[in-house]
Image (cartoon, grey):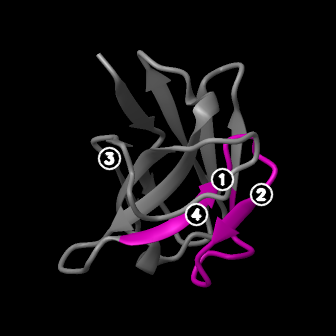
Amino acid sequence: QLQLVESGGGLVQPGGSLRLSCAGSGFTLDYYTISWFRQAPGKEREGVSCISNSGGSTNYADSVNGRFTISRDNAKNTVYLQMNSLKPEDTAVYYCAAAWVIGTNSRCRYYGMNYWGKGTLVTVSS
């Protein structure tokens, strides 16, 4: 069964840090760009960050640029999202998604995703 599994969410105080993981199960992530999305209560889902299949290029939403860092370890079939200086407005369910691509360093995107995880909840509150 092909699936993505997120982990690492939880409750953290403002200014704190969390690291989310997105692990591929049943398929290798080498041929996929990976994107993180989030959806807060009452709001639309938004793209947060993405990374190319080789890890050579990344993209960040303006709201998280400078605070979040995306990375991948293809040997572990896992993508990470390091979140620092968290704010209450970062509270959301975070999803990872995979997009199949051709090429060794294909640009990542926030549309046309092939696989989605079920999400992990991040709550930033004092």
In this figure, which residue is indicated by the disc labeled 4?
49
Q: Is residue 51 above or below residue 37?
A: above
Q: Label 4: how many residues lie within 10 Å, few (<14), some (14-19) or many (20+)?
A: many
Please, what is the three-letter code of the amino acid marked with disc 4?
A: Ser
Cβ atoms under marks 4 and 1 closer than 8 Å = yes
Q: Is residue 75 above or below residue 15?
A: above
Judging by the rendered image, the residue that carries numbered circle 2 is: 57
Q: Position of residue 15 (x, y in %)?
A: 62, 70
The extreme bottom residue here reads: 62
117 to the left or right of 8: left
Say which residue label 1 marks: 51
Residue 97: x %, y % from top left: 42, 47
Residue drawn 69% across the image and 76% down it? 65
The dot on residue 119 is: 3
Whether the residues at callouts 1 and 2 have beta carbons within 8 Å, the answer is: yes
Q: Which residues are magenta?
A: 46-69
Amino acid type, residue under disc 3 in the picture: Gly
Inter-mark Cα distance, 4 to 1: 7 Å
Nearer the N terminus, badge 4 or badge 2?
4
Q: Earlier in the sequence, mark 3 or mark 4?
A: 4
* Residue 70: mark in rendering: none
Count of picture labels: 4
Residue 107 shows in the view: yes
Please give the name of the residue rendered at 62% of the width and 41% of the height, measured from the top-left corner.
102
Amino acid type, mark 1: Ile
